[in-house]
Amino acid sequence: MNETMKTLLNRRSIRKYKSEQIKDEELKAVLEAGKYAPSGANQQSALFIVVQNKDIIKKISKMNAAVMEKENVDPYYGAPTVILVLADKSKATPVEDASIALGNMYNAAYSLGLGSCWIHRTREMFESGEGKKLLKEWGVEGDYIGVGSCILGYPDCELPKPAPRKDNFVIMVK
């Protein structure tokens, strides 16, 4: 089996991280994988906002937890890097484009020995007044939809075992 297939079959969501920040070259490689994801009509509608500032991560963690109506929960599982992925609503396939970019980033992270996990509620976070204010502070202009977040860090746990695959996953029509 080639390395790409091994990565695709072995990558798992990690929910416990070491506090050590990832290396800049690892982050750059993950972002590059996201930038080279396919996109509808090659419109490249995805936008990546990388957050490594601990205070900002705490702030967005509270915003994400508020969407769940929970307190004292860290939806980002202590990951030292959070990549918020949004997409330009004016493009043809913004959610699809950002989703496949996220997929590329998770697989790239695994290939580099990093842990990652998809975190939901990014859409709700950036539809809020607080979220829109943050985007403005960060210099984001335009009409964007939050799609998901990619958390990154060095795993501080065993790699989870894969869940069994469901039956009838594939229907062949020849």
Image: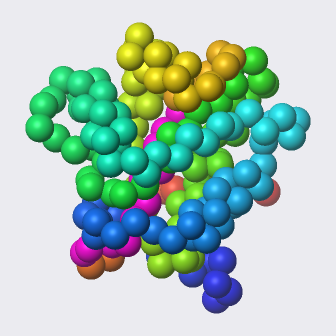
Q: Is residue 54 magenta?
A: no
Residue located 63% across and 25% down the image: 140
On screen, residue 6 above or below 149? below
Image coords of residue 13 (percent x, y): 38, 61
Q: Position of residue 86 (x, y in %)?
A: 58, 32
Q: Is 130 placed left or right of 91 in the picture?
A: left
Q: As rendered, which of 62 and 124 lies closer to the eye?
A: 62
Q: Is residue 161 left or right of residue 41?
A: left
Question: On the image, which quarter does residue 31 sit in?
Answer: bottom right
| Quarter where residue 98 is shown | top right
Q: Which quarter shows the N terminus?
A: bottom right
Residue 145 percent coordinates (x, y): 57, 23
Answer yes or no: is residue 160 visible. no
Residue at 67% across, 86% down: 2
Q: Which residues are magenta?
A: 147-157
How many labels were placed on the picture?
0
Give the main secondary structure, helix, strand or loop, of the magenta stretch: strand
Residue at the (53%, 33%) spot, across then down: 147
* Residue 171: % across, % down: 62, 54
Which residue is at the far bottom?
Answer: 1
Asked whether residue 156 is drawn in magenta, I would say yes
Q: Quadrant of the C terminus?
A: bottom right
Q: Pick out the residue farthest to the top.
A: 129
